[in-house]
Image (tube, rainbow, N blue to C red):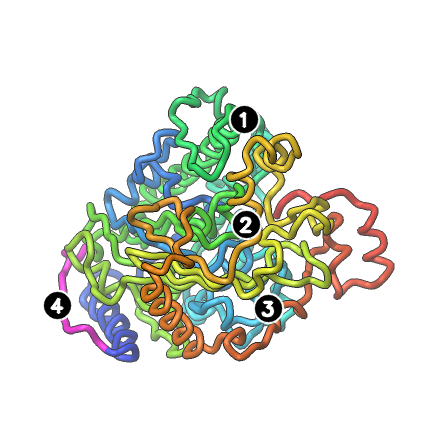
Amino acid sequence: MIAPTSFCWARPAPGAARRLGFCLASFALCSAGLAAADPRPNILLVVSDDQSWDGTGAAGNPTVRTPAFDRVAREGVRFTHAFTSSPSCTPARSALLTGRHIWQIGEGGVLYGTLPPTYPPFTHALQDAGYHAGWTGKGWGPGEWEAGGLPRHPLGREYNARLHRPAVSPALDARDYAANFDDFLRERPAGRPFFFWLGATEPHRVYEAGAGGRAGKRRADVVVPPYWPDTDLVRDDLLDYAQEIDWFDAQLAKVLARLEAAGELDRTVVVVTSDNGMPFPRAKVSLYDPGVRMPLAIRWPGRIPGGRVVDDFAAHIDLAPTLLAAAGLPIPDSYAGRSLLPLLASERSGRVEPGRDRAHFALERHTWCRPDGATYPIRGLRTHDFLYLRNFEPDRWPTGGPEFVSSNKTFHGDVDGAPIKDFMESPENQRRFPREFALCYGKRPLEELYDVRSDPHQINNLAADPAYAAVKARLWDELRGYLRRTGDPRLEGRDPWQGYAYRQTVGFGATYNRTLSAAERDAAAGRGAHKPQ
C-alpha cells in the first residue's frame, strides 16, 4: 500500500487540469507497479435512488442509521456540497456517466430518454482498458439505451438474478444486491481490476406505510422544513423515507464486508452517492437543495487521506473524469467535469481548491405532464452564498399543473405519488396550508434568488428586492456566459427536448410514447399507473 501523498501546485488552466489529474493518477499507479500484476484500483460506484444530501448519519440526520455510508465518509472524504446535474433519474445518471451537463447529451437529458453514441459513458473506456464491468439493481435509466445507437450497455453485464430469500417487503427491491455482487466477483477474470455499479432503488417510492415507526423511529426526531405542513402524516412519511435509507445502507454494508473478506476493500475506490433528491414536493424535480444537493463520500486508502470533510463543490459530472484518472486513463477534453483527484489527494479539510466554489444544474422534462410533451426548463447556479434560478417558461406549472393527466396517471405529475402529495393536494388542506401549497405547487417567476446562508431552506425569493439587484445581475450574467460557452440550446432560443421521445413502455405512461404504434398506445390508455422505475 502506498502512503498518502500531498501535492502543491498553482491553479492550472482547464486543459492543464485534465492533464494534471491524469498524470497524478499515472504517477500513483506507476509507483505501485512492482506491487501487483495490475496495480489499477477496483472501482465500486454506489448510487441510491432519490436521497437528498442530509439523509445520512454523517450529515447529522437523527432519523437515519447509516453506519456503512458513515464508515466510507470517516475513512475517506465526505463532501458537504456535492450536486447532481439534474433532479430526475435518467438525466442525472446520463450526466454522471458521460461527464457532461444535460444540455450537452441530447436525448440523455430527459426522463425515459436514450444515450447517443456521440457521448459514450466513461465505463466503456474502463472496459476497453481491461476492466471487468457489471451492475446490479437500477442501472442507467429509465429509458432505452439501445435506441440512440449506443453499441453496448452503459454499465457492462447485468447481475440481477439473485433475489432475497425470504422475500422482503414489496416496497423494497426484491433483488439481493450483495448476492448479485458475489456472482459478479466469481466471474471476474483472475488479476483483472473491476468496475461495479450498485444501483439501489431505495429510497425511491413507494414506501411501506408505517415502516419507519415500526422500526422504532420517532416522530419527535423529524425536522419538518418550513415548506411542508408539520403534521403527523408528513412526519410519518419522512420516517418511512428514512427507513428505506437504512435498508439501502444495510445492503451497502454487506457489499463492503464481501470486499473486506476478500482482501479487496483497500484496493477499491468506493464512491457512494445518490442520483437526485428525495421524492417529496419541492425536492425531487426542483433545483432547490433538497432536489440537487447529494450525499457523497469517497474512500481509497493509501491514495486518499481519510477522515476529512470537504466544503468544496463537487459535481456528479466530476466523477467520470475522477474515476478515469484513478484508473490511469486519459480524460476526454469534451468533458465538462473536472477530476477530483488533486483535491482528494490533499490532506486538507474545509475549503481546499479556490476554483471549486460553484455548481450548475438544470431540468428539462421529468414526467410527461404537460400537453405535447412540453418541458419545464430551469437552469441554476449555486455558490456558497446564493442560489440563482432561471425559469425559462414561468407561465407553465412546475409540477405539471392541475388539469393534465400525466404519464403516472395523476395531476401535478412531477410530484411523486405519496401520502404527502395526497394530503397537500386535497382542497381542504390547500386552504389550511396556503403558503406551503404555493411554495410546493405554485407557478414560479422568471428569476429566483436565495441567500442560502440566512435562508438555508430557500423560501424567501430576493429576485425582486432592489437591495439584491446587483447580485442578481451578476449571477445571471455568469450563468448565461457559462451556458453559452458550454453550448446550451436554450441560450440560442432552441428547445430540442420537447421533441424527444418519452420511451416508457409499461403502464399508462406508454400512451405518450411516440415510438410505439397507435394500437400499442391505445392499449396503454386502459392501464393503471406503472410502478415507479
Residue at the front extreme?
466
Whether residue 186 is visible here, answered yes or no, is no
Above/below status of 327 relative to 444: below
Label 1, secondary structure: give it: helix
Q: Earlier in the sequence, mark 1 or mark 4?
A: 4
Q: CA distance from mark 2 to mark 4?
A: 39 Å
Q: Earlier in the sequence, mark 2 or mark 4?
A: 4
Along the line of sight, the residue nearer the viewer: 179 or 212:
212
- Residues drawn in magenta: 1-12
Label 2, secondary structure: give it: loop
| Foreground: disc 1 or disc 4 | 1
Residue at the (58%, 29%) spot, across then down: 208
Above/below status of 380 relative to 246: below
Q: Position of residue 204 (x, y in %)?
A: 54, 42
Q: Residues within 10 Å of mark 2 (few under 14, many from 20)?
A: many
Tag 3 residue: 107
Tag 2 residue: 138
| Foreground: disc 2 or disc 4 | 4
Q: CA distance from mark 2 to mark 3?
A: 19 Å
Tag 1 residue: 233
Tag 4 residue: 8
Quadrant of the rendered structure where residue 188 is? Answer: bottom left
Residue 111 among magenta residues: no
Q: Earlier in the sequence, mark 1 or mark 2?
A: 2
Q: What's the amino acid at mark 4?
A: Cys
